[in-house]
Amino acid sequence: MTNRRLSNSTLKALPASVAAPRYDRGGVAPGIVHLGVGAFHRAHQAAYVDDCLAAGEADWGIVGVSLRSPDTRDALAPQDGLYALAIRSSIGEELRVIGSILSLLVAPEDPAAVLAALTDQRTRIVTLTITEKAYLRAAGGGLDSTHPDIAHDLANPQMPRTAHGFLTEALSRRRAAGIQPFTVLCCDNLPANGATLHRLLVEFAALRDSRLATSGDARLAAHIADGVAFPSSMVDRIVPATTDAERARIAVELGVEDAWPVMTEPFCQWVVENDFPAGRPAWEKFGVTMVGDVGPFEDMKLRLLNGSHSAIAYLGLLSGYDTVDRAFANPAIRQFVDGLWAEAIPTLPQDAGLDTAGYTAQLAERYSNTALAHRTAQIANDGSQKLPQRIVASALDRLGAGDPPAHLMLVVAAWIAACEARGKTLPEAHFADPIDARLTALGSRPADETVTAIFDLAGFAKDHAHRMTLIDLTAAHLERLRRGGTAAALAALGIGSEKP
């Protein structure tokens, strides 16, 4: 294997079969700061921006910011921000080098540099993929004002740790300097993600204002509430974790080393509400759907794709499958997913023109992609944060319409059973959840007590009239999973358990 690294100086030496930036990267100016520069961003938003740069929109380069770990910076900085995107299907692979990330910052190492990038008047959009748990919401959905990092950022606005702290301080500085606010574009799987982040940031700014009421301008919350755009968006692309074997294989294909290539599928979707007072790239030229209301698309994705993904992950883990394609190839799991979709589809807006039949057919094809090797353990992370919008919301809507959510609540039970299986039939740290410590403290209890305690811990269906119905359904599923495994739980739904 070659010891040369992918970089600006080695771009011209790449094989002709590899698509690479043909624009002058030195002439690209930063226009976007992205918080949470992980694999998904590099397979999704960064690729769309790369298309725009190639079309001559040279003022939309990306400054990538890691809010926690230096790993991405350490991998890509020696490569001038370049990396390979491996687009894999069951019939082949396409390699593309992405050049839209101009620089990378690590917030804990240099928060001042991150604030400088956010305050730069050239920055007109800030995008985020920081995962659900990083929004630091309390059980009721509002800001968790007791979180230590929130308390730190309120006390130390010049040295923030959270996205809330960075965005609020940057908007304060821009306002003081007379610089137009940037647009905040959330790209995480949150319900009404733009409105959700808007509400959280206004709550944070109001707490900050209360501290400044006697010492300075205390109107930042009103400025953010009324003067900053927070369009919602819906993103979709499957991005498995990169393995060392894939790094080695791609290095051979490129002829140079790439410390962190990204694996993905051919499918890519981005639906964005068109509210960008400071301007935006012409994303629509490259397949982005610009709309007035992203809600129906978001609901379809959360409930049909993300919901079934969680189902496949937890049932797959309990059945001994380590990847999505292997789990989905099990006829019983496939039949279950069809039943899950049948329950979720009626909860979607019926007047929005959504093609649910075409969408689920497309999902089935994507889940069957044998080249992707999307690990069930990767999807299983953070269930307590993901399941409320992916599963519980659909179940409550079903009950509100007088329909049972039997398939939906098996997903919640399978999550609990998979958590219980860690250290037994699954490795101890096979996947993680923000409430793991409290889950462990529950110990061994009867199914109904376990489920009630977990609903309390995770805040599932809090104060909802149908909460006990969900608990009872989940407890019955959990009892069957504990006694007879997935075969017994699926059989109770009339589903066979044979493996292919």
Image (tube, rainbow, N blue to C red):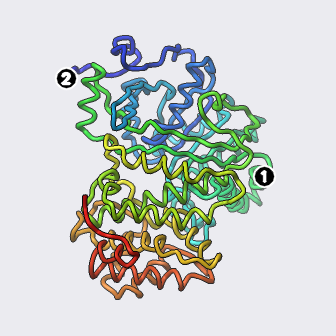
| Residue drawn at the location 40% of the way across and 38% of the way down | 264
Query: Pointer 2: what residue?
Result: 1
**What amino acid is at disc 1?**
Asp
| x and y percentages locating residue 490 in the rendered image | 36, 73
User: Which label's residue is closer to the chain start, 2 or 1?
Assistant: 2
Q: Secondary structure at mark 1?
A: loop
Residue 76 appears in the picture as rendered = yes
Residue 323 falls left or right of residue 80: left
Q: Residues within 10 Å of mark 1 (few under 14, many from 20)?
A: few
Among the 4 quarters of the image, the one containing residue 299? bottom right
Task: Measure the C-alpha gap from mark 2 to mark 1.
Answer: 59 Å
Query: Pointer 1: what residue?
Result: 217
> What mark, if any, has residue 318 been given in the picture?
none
| x and y percentages locating residue 397 in the rendered image | 62, 72
Give the farthest residue toward the top.
Answer: 12
Q: Secondary structure at mark 2?
A: loop
